[in-house]
Structure formats: C-alpha cells, structure tokens
Image: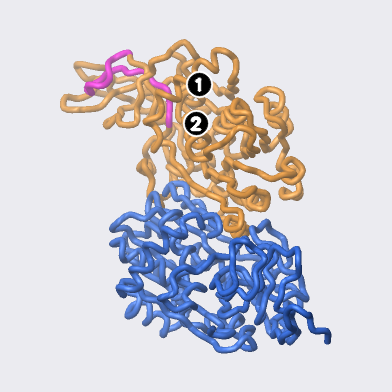
Chain colours: A blue, B orange
C-alpha cells in the first residue's frame, strides 16, 4: 500500500450503502468494511478532512439512501458509498477558508472514521463547547432546529393552545413538547412503549402521553385527551395517526408535517381519508424542511443553550458505542427501539 | 284560511328537505310543495321578509342539508324545512334597522317564493344594480368572493407561476382561472365534458384545459400540461385529482382546498396517498371558508365590477326558470350537467 509523502494512510472503518434502501433499513442494505485514507487533502481541493466523533441516526437517512424519486435538498447517496448523515466531527485538514485544523464542526458527513467533505456547505462550526458535543447531533443540531422551526415558525402556536406531538420521545418530539410547555400550552404526546410514555410525563413534562400501540381506536384516544380538540399537531408519523388527528382538529388549527415514519416501510402509502375536515375547520397543513430555516440557527442557540443550562429543557440520548454498531442502531430507530435521540460514538475526541 | 288584517296570505311555493342528504342530492330527498305566507312580519320581529328572485345552486348545499357532523359556520337544516341556500331577494317587509322595504339583497335565504329571515346576519344589501342581479348568486356574490379569497389570500400567487384549477368551468373555477391569467400566470383547468373544456379555452382564456373523464392517468395528464410542475392548485374536487396533483407540485407550492365535490357521493372518502410529497416540497395545503373573508367584499367589488364592465372578465351562467325546477337543477350540478354557474329564476323582479 502506497503511503503519501505529506500525510499518512490510516485505517478507515466505514458503513457503506450496499443497495438502495427500500422501506425500513435492513442489515443486508449496509456493509461494514475497513478501507484506508490519506489524512492530507490534495492540492486544489476546496474541502475539509474530518475525523468523525458522533454520528446521528435520523429517520431522513432512509429517505437519503432510497432510490431518488422526489426532489430533495440533499443528493441521494449511490450504493457503494458510505452512508451519509449528520455528525459531529473534528477538522484534521482543511483547504477551505472557513475551517481550520482543530475546528469542531457538525453537519453532513459520512458513516466512517474519517471523511473528506469536498463542499462543506452543510457544515457548522461549533462555538459553544460547554455542553456535551454529542448534543450537536440532536438538541443543538438539526433535530433541535427542526423542532424550533417546525413548532414556532410552521405551527405558529399561541399560549393556552392544545398541542399534540407524535413520536414524542424522539429527538425532535421531546423538544417540541417542552417548547410547547414553556409557551403555556397543553401538550399530549404519543409514543410506542410504556417506557417512552413514562419518560414523556415524568421527564419531559408532557401533560399527558399514550402508547399508540395500545389504542385500538386512535380517534377515541385523541378525543379522550383532547375533548375540546387539537389546535396544533406536530406530525412525525403520518398515516393512521394523521387521519385520526384530522377528525379532532379545532377550527383554524395548524398541522406541521415533519416526517411520516409510519409510511416508510410500506410499498404503497396508506390513504388519508379525512382531508375534507381541512375545509370547514380552515386548517393549514404544511410540510417543511429544516434547511430552509438555518438562518435562525444562532437565534435558536441563544434561546436553547441557557434553557438547557438552567435545566428548563432536558434532553435524553440513547448512546451506542462504536461505528460497527451503527447499522443496528439505525435499524433499531425504525423499530422504535431507541429511547431518546439515537447517537453512535465513533470516537469521543 | 284566516287572512291577517295588516298583511295578506299569499301562495308560497317551496322546496323542502324531505330527509337529510346522504351523498349527492336525489329527487327523493326533496319535496316540492305549496303553502301560504303572511306578507307582514309580526310585532317584535327583528327580521326581514323577502321575495326571492334568484336561487343559487352550490355544492355546499349538500353539506348544509346533510346530517350535521362537522362544525360549520352555518347551521344545518332540519328535514321538513325549506332548503337553505344563497339567493338574490327583494325586501317586502322589514323590522330590522339595516334593511328597508324595496331593498335588493343577497344572502342566505330559503328555497321558496317568500322567506322570513329572522336574523339577517348573512344578508348583503346590493348597491350596484347596473349588472344583472343574478350575478349576485355568482361572480358578485359568494362564489366570486370564494374565488377571490381562495386565490389571492390563500394561494398567495405570484406573476409567472403555474396554476391548476379543477372543476374549472364552475362558478368559482372560471373566475379563479381568469384572476390567474390577469396576474400573468400559466393556467390549466380540468372539467368533465368537451363543451366545458372548449369554454375554458375559448371563453375564459385558460392556456390549456382537459376533460378529466378522458384521462385514464391523471398524473400523466398533469405532467403533460405542467412539465415543470404546479405552483398553485385551487382544489374544488379532492380525491384522485388531489392525489395526482400532489405528485406534480413544485417546491413551496400552495394548495387551497375549496371543496371536495368528488367525495360527496361516497360512503367513505377515498384515501389520499401522496401526502408525503408535502414535506420535501414544503407545500402548504389549506382549507378555507369564504365567510371568514367577507371583510374584503367591498374591495373585491371595487376590483371586479370594472373588469366585468370592460370585458376583461367574462362570466357564464346556466339559468333555469321556475322554482319547481330547482331540485333537478341542484341534482344536475352534482352530475356536472350545468355549464357555468347554475342559477334558478324564481321571479325576475
């Protein structure tokens, strides 16, 4: 193996996309392998070379690794390449004027120990290092901004309104619920296990929470928790839950569509039948993509960092050690096995 | 029959709701009858007594006459009462300070020759009488305001955008298309017959139009007319057309939901499967009710009356003579038999 004169070849453990994901990711969709990498960027590069510290398991990875069919703001990954996703990394070498060796960053990287990021457009320099770095895969990173933009910007909530959050113990949901409580809303969350439901009530301060798997009639469950109806629905799951919510929305309610986890494993999406309700109830339903809102990132950090430090917002992570365990962590996410934000530690420094 | 001393009993032909509508209205849901009415309001009334001149056949009548299940801004009608709907009327007697004998009005009235309107909250005095009075059932009334509010307020269109309108030759659709053309948009409409499609192109100036009944694949039809996708969809039909549109929306598109004509005859609404598209495409889908926008009515008339007089907006009515023909006109509306706005003449003065 040739060793470059100005750098050095090192081992690079990687998780590759074996084939396009179809439905929930499976073991056979991914390949754990070891290659090598030169730790010096070539002349003429405009990129950065990073050592990945934490990798983030997020539902949208399923979308990124699927055969491209819809317009997206991030290009789909081709089979044979490392899985792409968000992570926290340290800059090892930089030929980009915005980054220097030693910088801590978060953004789009590869599922491997070291990544070359040729066009570091989706890479944020980490300025505040007095909170755990892994938080930048969650509450201080994309999921945090997703909760912030989706709740404050898209849902336009008002004090005293009733708020429902699905997949409420996830990275985004737990934060949406806490934002809503801080605003003086009545907040109910749904999740898929007793443990998560307990967490919602005891740790995150939701007024109520329920296990959707134990509710044979979601409409009845929602009527129980929202006898006067729902003003704001933060939807992470789509499908049957969305359909039941449509029967329970209040006039001038707002639904922000953040993801449709319940639909990603279906060949054909479930039909949503209760859309007519949007008309007499004058409901606004809106999809959003967090990257449209990153101009608010500094404002978001200004708000959320003090709240975390003061203990007014809490945050739960589900941490897995070792990149070789990343595939099973990702698979587990789609089966609701994680409790809190799913993070993979590649190396803690 | 007792004749009142201060008024006089006169014949009052009526169309009653025989039973709650279920699905499209049928002959057997309505009863044509003749009763009598005293043309003087009793002491203590705060209402008006009107002679109805024109009655308006609108899709929402199906909703008003159905068993109440959803919140609405207008109370549902009970079986045995006259069908309620919008009309143009002349005030015969008034005990309400806002109206005087001889006033021409439009608003919510009964399907009968004479109606007592006890609380005339939804009654507008007609100020401009230099256009046909029947226009106040359509372009100058609720359907006109629906097109105006739904297009300008809800769709927030921009010059040069691509606009699709379903049920485009109807009272609302024909106006939405013309508004969009005046704004410099590319406009395509769908309708259910060759005659209507011809009208859209030759009379209303749509750039393109197609007969949805002759399109085995609505997605393919939309791709043909919108190779670059749809910015604005003004939805009057819901169901399969909405589902196909969701596959063809552009990023940051807007869908205003005005009605779901395709669903009113189904026991169980069709499922809409392509909602996921709302997320990566950041689409806003919003239902609206015209009554929320009546504060803009004067502004609307200021805009639209000169345009009609200058021939820059044209308007097509489908006029049926005689209240006894109102039931079949209403039924015909739900089968797309009308060409243009369906109006029933009760008496022209």
Can residue B260 be seen here? The reply is yes
The residue sitting at the front extreme is A5
Q: Quadrant of residue A333?
A: bottom right
Q: Position of residue A197 (x, y in %)?
A: 39, 79
Q: Quadrant of the N terminus of chain B?
A: top left
Q: Which residues are magenta?
A: B86-102
Q: Which mark is residue B304?
A: 1
Chain ID of residue with mark 2: B
- In the rendered view of the protein, which quadrant contains the C terminus of chain B? top left
Instruction: Compare residues B257 and B56 and report the one nearer the observer.
Output: B257
Q: Quadrant of residue A17?
A: bottom right
Tell me the residue that label 2 is attached to: B148
Residue at x-position 50% and y-position 69%: A126
Name the secondary structure under disc 1. helix
- x, y percent for residue B219: 72, 50
- On the question of residue A29 being in view, the answer is no
Labels 2 and 1: the sequence-earlier one: 2
- Residue nearest the viewer, comparing B73 with A110: A110
Against A323, residue B17 (above or below) is: above
Snapshot quadrant of residue B50 = top left
Q: Secondary structure at mark 2?
A: helix
């Amino acid at each position: 193996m040739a060793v470059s004169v100005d750098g050095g070849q090192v081992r690079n453990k990687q998780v590759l996309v074996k084939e396009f994901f179809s439905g929930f990711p499976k073991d056979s969709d991914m390949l754990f392998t070891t290659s090598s990498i030169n730790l010096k960027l070539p002349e003429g590069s405009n990129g950065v070379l990073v050592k990945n510290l934490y990798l983030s398991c997020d539902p949208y990875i399923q979308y990124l690794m699927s055969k491209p069919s819809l317009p997206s703001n991030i290009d789909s990954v081709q089979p044979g390449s490392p899985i792409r996703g968000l992570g926290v990394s340290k800059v090892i070498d930089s030929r980009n004027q915005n980054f220097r060796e030693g910088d801590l960053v978060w953004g789009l990287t590869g599922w491997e120990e070291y990544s070359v990021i040729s066009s570091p457009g989706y890479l944020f320099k980490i300025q505040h290092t007095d909170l755990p770095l892994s938080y930048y895969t969650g509450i201080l990173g994309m999921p945090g901004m997703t909760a912030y933009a989706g709740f404050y910007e898209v849902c336009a909530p008002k004090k005293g309104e009733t708020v429902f959050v699905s997949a409420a113990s996830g990275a985004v949901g737990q934060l949406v619920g806490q934002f809503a409580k801080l605003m003086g809303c009545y907040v109910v969350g749904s999740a898929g296990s007793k443990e998560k439901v307990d967490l919602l009530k005891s740790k995150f301060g939701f007024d109520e929470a329920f296990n959707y798997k134990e509710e044979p009639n979601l409409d009845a469950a929602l009527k129980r928790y929202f006898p006067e109806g729902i003003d704001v629905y933060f939807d992470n799951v789509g499908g049957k839950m969305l359909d039941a919510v449509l029967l329970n929305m209040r006039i001038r309610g707002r639904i922000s569509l953040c993801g449709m986890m319940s639909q990603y494993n279906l060949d054909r999406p479930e039909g949503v039948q209760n859309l007519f309700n949007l008309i007499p109830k004058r409901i606004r339903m809106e999809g959003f993509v967090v990257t449209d809102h990153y101009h608010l990132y500094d404002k978001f950090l200004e708000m959320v960092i003090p709240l975390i430090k003061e203990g007014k917002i809490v945050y739960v992570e589900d941490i897995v050690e070792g990149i070789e365990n990343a595939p099973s962590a990702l698979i587990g996410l789609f089966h609701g096995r994680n409790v809190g934000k799913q993070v993979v530690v590649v190396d803690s420094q």
